[in-house]
Amino acid sequence: MLSPQDLLVALKLLQAEAPTHSYALLGRSLGLSQTQVHEACERLTVSRLLRPGTFTPIRASLVSVLVKGVPYFLPAPQEGEELVRRVSTGCAVAPLPGTAAQPVVWPHEQGANEGYALQPLCPEAVGAAQRDPGLYQLLALTDLVRSHRSGLRERSLAAQRLEHLILEPVAAV
């Protein structure tokens, strides 16, 4: 069974600058231990989201899991109806033209933006996103797909954008 950290590892591995030669370096970039990254890669391989013996995600399968599975097995619980100051996610990071999504934020002490609190994919996601803008965008789009605060239009547009960002590098080759 996949864990939220497994998906964080998979999303990081989509980044061109991901350290793909060392579990320790990959872990440091994500705020995870070497063991956590190794176990995540094992589960991703068994789940057919990572090519065996490599750090290469199977992009089409990952898109399917993010768009069709994650909203159900890793929904983004909201934390109340009050606006709070935290770290932006959702449309504040990955704007979707023509939508009026409510601002959502991750609960984190370093945040300065206002929105409705939303649990991140996993606790390590916030720090990892702050160190990697490409990963941040993928996590924000994943949050839009996971969130019950997002309307059907926002979830659909976020899913399309995720698919484009994940599959585009393959089409360019």
Image (spheres, helix red, strand yellow):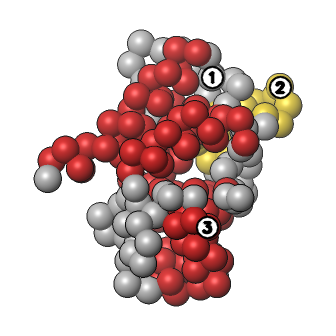
- Badge 2 element: strand
- Can you identify the residue that label 3 sits on? 43
Residue at 39% in and 19% down: 97
What kind of element bears circle 3? helix
Q: Which mark is residue 81?
A: 2
Report whether 21 appears left or right of 144: left
> Looking at the picture, how far across and down is residue 113, in whole percent?
61, 40
Q: In the rendered structure, which amino acid carries the disc numbered 3? A: Arg
Who's the residue at 41% across and 66% down the image? 51
Three-letter residue code for mark 2:
Glu
Q: In front of the other: label 2 or label 1?
A: 1
Looking at the rendered structure, which numbered label has been put on residue 37? none
Quick one: 164 or 112, which is closer to the camera? 164
Q: Is 46 positioned to the left or the right of 136 in the image?
A: right
Q: Which residue is mark 1?
A: 150
Question: Which residue appears at 42% of the width and 12% of the height?
Answer: 98
